[in-house]
Amino acid sequence: MPADIASRDSTIAKAYEDYLTAVLAEPAVIGVLTWGLSDRYTWLSSFAPRSDGLAVRPLPLDTELKRKPAWNAIASALDNAPKR
């Protein structure tokens, strides 16, 4: 995996974890919804492609349906969330 992709994936994972950690601290939150799971099927590829031509990688699974750092970030935020 090129360093740029690893860096991008790390940045996205941190955003997922930071956001979910903050949101899940709120007792009123009882669910989490993601707009897709795999980069293979993301609507962003056609609706909001990257200006540099690289593939968008916003979701927890890559185009081969393998877990990315975002998957682990989501799991960590859920594991560490206050119990409901």
Image (cartoon, helix red, strand yellow):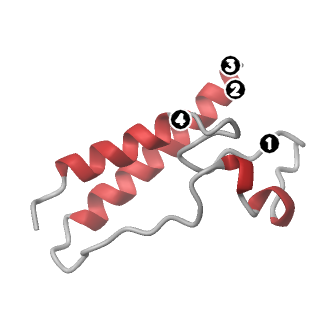
Residue 6 falls left or right of residue 4: left
Secondary element at image label 3 = loop
Residue picked out by circle 2: 4
| Mark 3 surroundings within 10 Å by alpha-carbon count, few (fewer than 14), some (14 through 19), many (20 or more) | few
Q: Position of residue 56 (x, y in %)?
A: 74, 47
Q: Disc 4 or 1, which lies upstream in sequence?
A: 1
In the rendered view, tell whether residue 8 sits above or below residue 26: above
Nearest the eye: 74 or 51:
74
Give me the C-alpha separation between circle 1 and circle 2: 11 Å
| Mark 4 surroundings within 10 Å by alpha-carbon count, few (fewer than 14), some (14 through 19), many (20 or more) | many
Give me the C-alpha separation between circle 3 and circle 1: 13 Å
Nearest the eye: 36 or 50:
36
Quarter of the figure with the C terminus = bottom left
Q: What residue type is labelled 4?
A: Lys
Q: Where is residue 36 in the image (x, y as percent from the top left)?
A: 59, 61
The residue furthest front is 65
Give me the C-alpha separation between circle 2 and circle 4: 14 Å
The residue furthest bottom is 28
Secondary element at image label 1 = loop
Q: Disc 2 or disc 3, which is closer to the eye? A: 3
Q: Which residue is drawn at 57% across and 34% down?
A: 66
Residue picked out by circle 4: 68
Q: Which amino acid does label 2 sit on?
A: Asp
Q: Where is residue 59 in the image (x, y as percent from the top left)?
A: 58, 50
Residue picked out by circle 1: 55
Q: Disc 2 or disc 4, which is closer to the eye? A: 4
Give me the C-alpha separation between circle 2 and circle 3: 8 Å
Give me the C-alpha separation between circle 4 and circle 1: 14 Å
Residue 1 circle label: 3
Q: Which residue is drawn at 67% across and 19% down?
A: 3
Q: Disc 2 or 4, which lies upstream in sequence?
A: 2
Tell me where residue 4 sits by quadrant: top right
